Amino acid sequence: MQFNGFEHLTANYIYCPNQFFEVCLRHQSRGCVRLVAYILRKTLGYLDKHGNPIKEDIRISYADISKYAGISTRSIPKALSDAESGKFISCVTAGIANSRGQSGQAAEYRLRWSDDDYTNNPEQFNGFFAGDGNRSPIPNAYFDVVISQETLVMAKVVGTILRHTVGYQNQFGGRRTEAPLSFSYIQQYANVSDRTALSEALKNGINNGYIHCTCEGYFDPNAGRHSRAASYAVKWLDKGTNKKSTAKSLPDKFQQGKNHTGNPAIKLPEQDGKKPTDTKTLENNTDKQQDDSSVVAVENLESLELLRQAGFDEDVALELSRKRGLLEIKQQIEWLPHRNPERNSLGMLRKAIESNWSKPDSIINAEKKQQRQQQDQKQATQEGVDDAQVFQAKQEKKRRRERLLPVWDKLSNDERSQIEKLAITELNSDFLRGRFKKNEEFRLNQCLDLLTDQQNR
């Protein structure tokens, strides 16, 4: 079925954490992205009058995940594992399998939130930012249709355009209706390594009715004086379009009498301090198709300038900028000094770009050496910590001995004998019991330990 456009932000949408786009969507697998999006949608899609989720612990079965999140049954365990290890969700109640005399129960999960400072670094991410702001109003159909039914690259492309249009709010409360986005910028932000797949996703996104190009990019071969990036916008429903043809709603069994976020009076988190306005998403009816030359316009310009600075003439620079992407060209220029070029450095650089040579061994070895040094430093630091802990334990043992010896000296022979009998029974090996009998210092320490336990009770 042809998608006619997203409902305007006066209708069904959720305030989605920006880290979903910057951490999850950019770096995780399709299964993980679909799972996290599904739980986000079920959690933030139903809010009370104070803007808080009606239910944070979401019970999900394999059947529901497969049907509504678009994840195959065999891929669900890995998606759950990736989402938990990525710190996007946490398990509240483990699932129970069906057995004789006992019915099974689906596991319960909840979004993981963090009070740490906002970060878009996956290694520092410890849960979605729980503070004010850093959220974007995203139409429900993006989760229900694009993420659950389309490829990961398509979800990244549409998500990038949503994030850079309605995801930005100026000081007057207005939001962008379109954004200039070069091919290289979309590739970098969405973290898509395959340029062909990205180009196809842009074309299919336009053909499928998710996005449209409001201004085609242009590459000016005359030193780039008149080059410009293409501008994209999300495709919104015409005002007269029947809502039934838009995003699919959640099944009745998920709604449970809850208020849907289609009611803007109850769906906006108060802490965000943002109010919707009818002027956020003005419809632009231009629906232009763009070819590859318009998509890569600004990228070609940036690549061309880098190649000129490296020493290539205009014709060679233009030819190379059309063969390889900006990221590959940057890498090869940075790696050239490590290839030890002697006479014809430009010739070597040209071959490296054309053949997309791999990273030089000298850089790989340097990186490995740095990793080893970091590991050694980490190990030395840990050993220092361990030594400090051992020293501290010895000091504590010495202070305890000095404190308990006067108490031990005041005990009668019968009291000491009782403590010794009890202490030896607590030893769990013949070796230790033999040592207890022969080594007076060891026997005294065991008795003092037991005496400490008795005083602490």
Image (cartoon, rainbow, N blue to C red):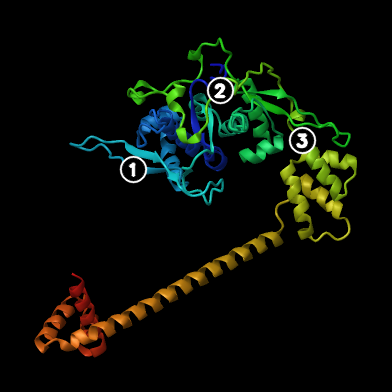
Q: Which element type, helix, strand or loop, lies under badge 2? A: loop
Query: Residue 298 shows which numbered tag?
Result: 3
Disc 3: CA contacts within 10 A as few (<14), some (14-19) or many (>=20) = many
Task: State the image coordinates of residue 399 (x, y, percent, origin top left).
Answer: 31, 81
Q: Nearer the viewer, residue 453 or 84?
A: 453
Q: Nearer the viewer, residue 257 or 148?
A: 257
Q: In the displayed image of the protein, which residue is found farthest to the top?
A: 240
Q: Nearer the viewer, residue 144 or 121?
A: 121
Q: Quick check: 211 left or right of 431? A: right
Q: Residue at x 64, y 25 (%)?
A: 177
Task: State the image coordinates of residue 104 (x, y, percent, origin top left).
Answer: 26, 36
Q: Nearer the viewer, residue 396 or 247?
A: 396
Q: Residue at x 23, y 38 (%)?
A: 99
Query: Residue 92 shows which numbered tag?
Result: 1
Q: Is residue 72 visible?
A: no
What's the amino acid at mark 2? Thr
Q: In the displayed image of the protein, which residue is found farthest to the left?
A: 414
Residue at mark 2: 277
Q: Which element type, helix, strand or loop, lies under badge 1? A: strand
- Measure how far apart labels 1 and 2 are at the Cα level: 37 Å
- Measure how far apart labels 3 and 1 are at the Cα level: 48 Å
What's the amino acid at mark 3? Val
Q: Which is more N-terminal, label 2 or label 3?
A: 2
Task: State the image coordinates of residue 233 (x, y, percent, origin top left).
Answer: 65, 25
- Measure how far apart labels 3 and 2 are at the Cα level: 33 Å
Tell whether label 2 touches label 3 (CB within 8 Å): no
Q: Which is more N-terminal, label 2 or label 1?
A: 1
Q: Quick check: 428 left or right of 284? A: left
Tell whether label 2 touches label 1 (CB within 8 Å): no
| 100 up-or-down from 114: above or below | above
